[in-house]
Image (cartoon, rainbow, N blue to C red):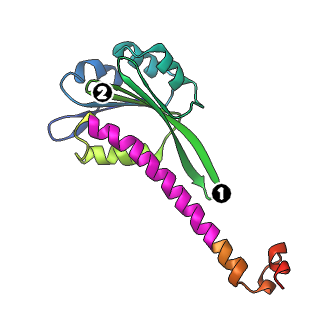
Amino acid sequence: MPARLLVKEASTVADRPPDQLSELRGEHPCWLDIADPKGEDLRQAASELDLHPLALEDAQHQHQRPKIDEYDDTTSSSSTPRGAEPDVIRHRELGIFVKHNAIVTVHEGSLAALAVVERASAKGKLATTGLLLHALPTRSSTAISDILDGLGDRVELIEAMVIDGDPRDSQTSIASCSS
Protein backbone atom coordinates (compact mmCIF):
# COMPACT_ATOMS: atom_id res chain seq x y z
CA MET A 1 0.00 0.00 0.00
CA PRO A 2 1.73 3.21 -1.10
CA ALA A 3 2.02 6.33 1.03
CA ARG A 4 -0.59 9.02 0.40
CA LEU A 5 -0.24 12.76 0.78
CA LEU A 6 -3.57 14.54 1.26
CA VAL A 7 -3.36 18.31 0.93
CA LYS A 8 -6.11 20.72 2.00
CA GLU A 9 -6.49 23.26 -0.76
CA ALA A 10 -9.02 26.09 -1.09
CA SER A 11 -12.17 24.00 -1.52
CA THR A 12 -10.90 20.42 -1.86
CA VAL A 13 -8.52 17.86 -0.48
CA ALA A 14 -6.09 16.78 -3.19
CA ASP A 15 -4.04 13.59 -3.41
CA ARG A 16 -0.43 14.59 -4.17
CA PRO A 17 2.84 12.66 -4.54
CA PRO A 18 4.41 12.10 -1.08
CA ASP A 19 7.68 13.71 -2.10
CA GLN A 20 5.90 17.09 -2.33
CA LEU A 21 5.26 17.26 1.43
CA SER A 22 7.99 19.79 2.26
CA GLU A 23 7.04 22.27 -0.42
CA LEU A 24 3.25 22.01 0.06
CA ARG A 25 3.08 22.17 3.86
CA GLY A 26 4.28 25.76 3.84
CA GLU A 27 1.01 26.87 2.23
CA HIS A 28 -1.48 24.09 2.95
CA PRO A 29 -2.32 21.69 5.78
CA CYS A 30 -0.94 18.27 4.78
CA TRP A 31 -1.51 14.71 5.93
CA LEU A 32 0.99 12.06 4.88
CA ASP A 33 -0.29 8.54 5.59
CA ILE A 34 2.34 5.80 5.48
CA ALA A 35 1.14 2.18 5.62
CA ASP A 36 4.62 0.62 5.61
CA PRO A 37 6.73 1.70 8.61
CA LYS A 38 9.83 0.02 7.23
CA GLY A 39 9.57 1.50 3.73
CA GLU A 40 11.36 4.31 1.96
CA ASP A 41 8.44 6.73 2.37
CA LEU A 42 8.98 6.98 6.13
CA ARG A 43 12.73 7.48 5.74
CA GLN A 44 12.10 10.23 3.19
CA ALA A 45 9.51 11.95 5.43
CA ALA A 46 11.87 11.68 8.41
CA SER A 47 14.62 13.35 6.43
CA GLU A 48 12.39 16.11 5.03
CA LEU A 49 10.74 16.89 8.38
CA ASP A 50 13.81 16.31 10.56
CA LEU A 51 12.05 13.74 12.75
CA HIS A 52 13.87 12.67 15.89
CA PRO A 53 15.66 9.29 15.48
CA LEU A 54 14.08 7.81 18.63
CA ALA A 55 10.59 8.74 17.47
CA LEU A 56 11.34 7.26 14.07
CA GLU A 57 12.57 4.05 15.69
CA ASP A 58 9.33 3.78 17.71
CA ALA A 59 7.27 4.12 14.53
CA GLN A 60 9.29 1.45 12.73
CA HIS A 61 9.19 -1.08 15.57
CA GLN A 62 5.64 -1.85 16.56
CA HIS A 63 4.51 -2.94 20.05
CA GLN A 64 5.05 0.40 21.74
CA ARG A 65 2.96 1.53 24.66
CA PRO A 66 0.61 4.43 24.04
CA LYS A 67 2.59 7.60 24.75
CA ILE A 68 3.40 11.11 23.69
CA ASP A 69 7.01 12.18 23.32
CA GLU A 70 7.88 15.81 22.69
CA TYR A 71 11.00 16.67 20.73
CA ASP A 72 11.12 19.60 18.30
CA ASP A 73 7.74 18.29 17.22
CA THR A 74 5.21 16.03 18.91
CA THR A 75 5.07 12.30 18.40
CA SER A 76 2.20 10.18 19.63
CA SER A 77 1.84 6.40 19.50
CA SER A 78 -1.55 4.90 20.22
CA SER A 79 -3.14 1.48 19.85
CA THR A 80 -6.02 0.85 17.52
CA PRO A 81 -7.66 -2.56 17.68
CA ARG A 82 -9.82 -3.57 14.81
CA GLY A 83 -12.36 -6.36 14.64
CA ALA A 84 -11.76 -8.17 11.39
CA GLU A 85 -13.75 -11.20 12.45
CA PRO A 86 -16.45 -11.60 15.09
CA ASP A 87 -14.20 -13.47 17.54
CA VAL A 88 -10.89 -11.72 16.82
CA ILE A 89 -9.54 -8.33 17.82
CA ARG A 90 -6.36 -7.37 16.02
CA HIS A 91 -3.97 -4.84 17.46
CA ARG A 92 -2.58 -2.13 15.19
CA GLU A 93 -0.36 0.74 16.23
CA LEU A 94 -0.71 4.21 14.86
CA GLY A 95 2.25 6.58 15.10
CA ILE A 96 1.49 10.26 14.65
CA PHE A 97 4.12 12.91 13.93
CA VAL A 98 3.11 16.55 14.13
CA LYS A 99 5.06 19.33 12.49
CA HIS A 100 3.95 22.82 11.49
CA ASN A 101 1.14 22.38 8.95
CA ALA A 102 1.82 18.64 8.56
CA ILE A 103 0.75 15.40 10.18
CA VAL A 104 2.36 12.08 9.33
CA THR A 105 0.60 8.86 10.33
CA VAL A 106 2.50 5.57 10.31
CA HIS A 107 0.99 2.10 10.62
CA GLU A 108 1.07 -1.37 9.09
CA GLY A 109 -1.61 -2.19 6.54
CA SER A 110 -4.97 -0.45 6.45
CA LEU A 111 -6.94 0.94 9.37
CA ALA A 112 -10.69 1.50 9.14
CA ALA A 113 -10.46 4.43 11.57
CA LEU A 114 -8.15 6.27 9.17
CA ALA A 115 -10.55 5.72 6.28
CA VAL A 116 -13.31 7.39 8.30
CA VAL A 117 -11.04 10.36 9.09
CA GLU A 118 -10.01 10.60 5.45
CA ARG A 119 -13.66 10.75 4.32
CA ALA A 120 -14.35 13.54 6.83
CA SER A 121 -11.27 15.39 5.62
CA ALA A 122 -12.33 15.03 1.98
CA LYS A 123 -15.71 16.58 2.86
CA GLY A 124 -13.91 19.63 4.27
CA LYS A 125 -14.77 18.87 7.90
CA LEU A 126 -11.11 18.80 8.99
CA ALA A 127 -9.69 21.97 7.49
CA THR A 128 -6.67 22.33 9.79
CA THR A 129 -3.96 20.05 11.12
CA GLY A 130 -5.35 20.68 14.62
CA LEU A 131 -8.75 19.29 13.68
CA LEU A 132 -7.11 16.37 11.91
CA LEU A 133 -4.93 15.67 14.95
CA HIS A 134 -8.03 15.66 17.14
CA ALA A 135 -9.95 13.35 14.79
CA LEU A 136 -7.27 10.63 14.52
CA PRO A 137 -7.21 9.39 18.16
CA THR A 138 -10.91 10.21 18.62
CA ARG A 139 -11.89 7.92 15.75
CA SER A 140 -9.50 5.25 17.02
CA SER A 141 -11.18 5.42 20.44
CA THR A 142 -14.58 5.16 18.78
CA ALA A 143 -13.39 2.02 16.96
CA ILE A 144 -12.43 0.50 20.32
CA SER A 145 -15.85 1.41 21.77
CA ASP A 146 -17.63 -0.13 18.77
CA ILE A 147 -15.74 -3.39 19.26
CA LEU A 148 -16.45 -3.44 23.00
CA ASP A 149 -20.14 -2.69 22.38
CA GLY A 150 -20.32 -5.63 19.99
CA LEU A 151 -18.69 -7.92 22.54
CA GLY A 152 -21.07 -6.62 25.22
CA ASP A 153 -24.05 -7.43 23.02
CA ARG A 154 -22.77 -10.98 22.58
CA VAL A 155 -22.28 -11.40 26.34
CA GLU A 156 -25.85 -10.21 26.96
CA LEU A 157 -27.15 -12.72 24.41
CA ILE A 158 -25.27 -15.56 26.11
CA GLU A 159 -26.54 -14.41 29.53
CA ALA A 160 -30.10 -14.41 28.23
CA MET A 161 -29.65 -17.91 26.82
CA VAL A 162 -28.27 -19.18 30.14
CA ILE A 163 -30.79 -17.47 32.41
CA ASP A 164 -33.97 -17.54 30.31
CA GLY A 165 -33.34 -20.49 28.03
CA ASP A 166 -34.84 -23.93 28.21
CA PRO A 167 -32.15 -26.38 29.41
CA ARG A 168 -33.32 -28.85 26.75
CA ASP A 169 -32.28 -26.36 24.01
CA SER A 170 -28.60 -26.57 24.83
CA GLN A 171 -26.06 -29.27 25.56
CA THR A 172 -23.77 -26.99 27.61
CA SER A 173 -22.70 -27.86 31.13
CA ILE A 174 -24.21 -24.56 32.30
CA ALA A 175 -27.66 -25.54 31.02
CA SER A 176 -27.42 -29.01 32.55
CA CYS A 177 -26.49 -27.54 35.94
CA SER A 178 -29.68 -25.46 36.09
CA SER A 179 -32.08 -28.41 35.83
Mainly helix, strand or loop, the magenta region?
helix
In the picture as drawn, the residue positioned furthest to the left comes out as 10
Q: Residues within 10 Å of mark 2 (few under 14, many from 20)?
A: many
Q: Can you give x and y, in whole percent of width and height, for residue 109 in the image?
A: 52, 37
Q: Give the answer, above or below, for where 148 lies relative to 102.
A: below
The residue shown at (72%, 77%) is 162
In what element is the residue under mark 1?
A: loop
The answer for how far apart the CA atoms under marks 1 and 2 are is 37 Å
In the image, residue 144 lies in the stretch drawn in magenta = yes
The quadrant in which the C terminus is found is bottom right
- Range drawn in magenta: 130-156
Residue 102's label in the rendered image is: 2
- Residue drawn at x 24%, y 24% is 25
Residue 109, disc: none
Does residue 2 appear in the picture of this structure?
no
Classed neighbour count for the residue bearing mark 1: other residues with Cα under 10 Å, few (<14), some (14–19), many (≥20): few
Magenta stretch: includes residue 154: yes
At a point 25% along the width and 27% down the height, the residue shown is 101
**Residue 152: x and y, percent?**
58, 64
The disc labelled 2 sits on which kind of residue?
Ala
- Identify the mark nearer the N-term, 1 or 2: 1
Residue 121 point in image, percent of width and height: 28, 43
**Residue 87 got which mark?**
1
The amino acid marked with disc number 1 is Asp
